[in-house]
Amino acid sequence: MNSLGKRFFFFVAVVLTCATPVMANQAPGPGVSLPQILMLPLMTLFTALGGAYSILRAEKKSKAGKAGKWVAVAVLFLWGFTHEVASMLVTCVFGAIAIYRGICMIKWGMMPGTSTPLLSSKVPGWRLIPAGIAICVVATLLMESAVVFVGYWPDLYQGSQVSNLKRVLAFEIAFGRTKKEQTGETRFYRINRTDENVWYIQELLRHDNVRVDFDREDKHFTVYLLPYSKFPPWPYRHWTKQGSYRADETGQIRMIWAKRADEVCPADAAVVMKVTEEDIREMMKMVYTK
């Protein structure tokens, strides 16, 4: 790699290390930003493994042209982190460059024994062709990743659901205690999707990934909070995971990391959150009976 390339990657490393987050726009998530970050370094790696730099050095390019190229790449790279759509577009641009490099390497590898000004430094095809194919495959996977992960923010949306789930649990426990004081028997408030009395119950149940089961006497209940977002298509679904939650009248919220949208949290999963007595006391002030 030439000195300009080394300076560019050093500049990028410094920016990524020192930059602080800004609450503006919709910055790209890992599924979108990582392909942008990895595209050019991986292209550089496979180009070196294939021995193509000895061929590229034979091309006559002005220093001004090289400098302009690296400046353009740096500007595009930084612009990509302003918004996830911008990052996706930059990744596709970098991917097109990488695929073009890969195709050139495959062509060079299919010309063994030739001697042209461009191929004055001969490189064996067994190095060029596999490395060129690898660049094309990796670039395609990274571009597809940047596209399918645009708008994929499962933690952001499900975080608000978990907060509402905790409020609902506190409400149910407070309701059950109130019922016990009145009747001597604990019974919970049977909630459903048409319930409009409590806003956080309505907010929780309006999503299709929530299921609530009550026993026949309303003495026990279980709330299932399945993964919120639709998983990306194969093979990218294996690159991510989402929380699947389970809660009941004990006030404990359990969770597992799910790889499928229908994966239910088991009853023996680890407890990740619990309703506190303070939460219940606050709800006791708001509870009403029917």
Image (spheres, rainbow, N blue to C red):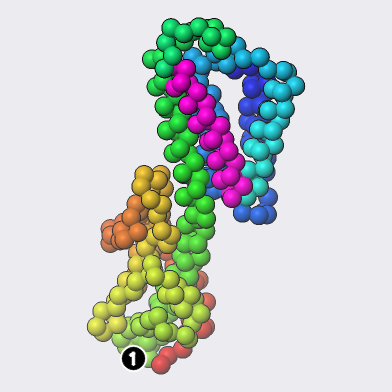
Res. 29 visible in picture: yes
Residue displayed at 28% across by 62% down: 267
Q: Amino acid at mark 1?
A: Thr
| Nearer-the-camera pick, 228 or 127 | 127
Residue 95 in magenta stretch:
yes
Q: Dominant secondary structure of the magenta stretch?
A: helix
User: Which secondary structure lies at badge 1?
Assistant: helix
Res. 177 visible in picture: no
| Bounds of the magenta segment | 84-109
- Name the spot of residue 56 as percent of width and height, x first: 57, 16
Residue displayed at 32% across by 88% down: 184
Residue displayed at 55% across by 41% down: 92
| The image quarter in which residue 247 lies | bottom left
Residue 16 in magenta stretch:
no
Against 50, is 244 above or below? below
Left or right placement of residue 215 versus residue 61 in this view: left
Residue displayed at 49% across by 54% down: 152
| The image quarter in which residue 166 lies | bottom left
Query: What residue would you read off at disc 1?
Result: 183
- Name the spot of residue 249 as percent of width and height, x first: 35, 73
Q: Quadrant of the N terminus?
A: top right
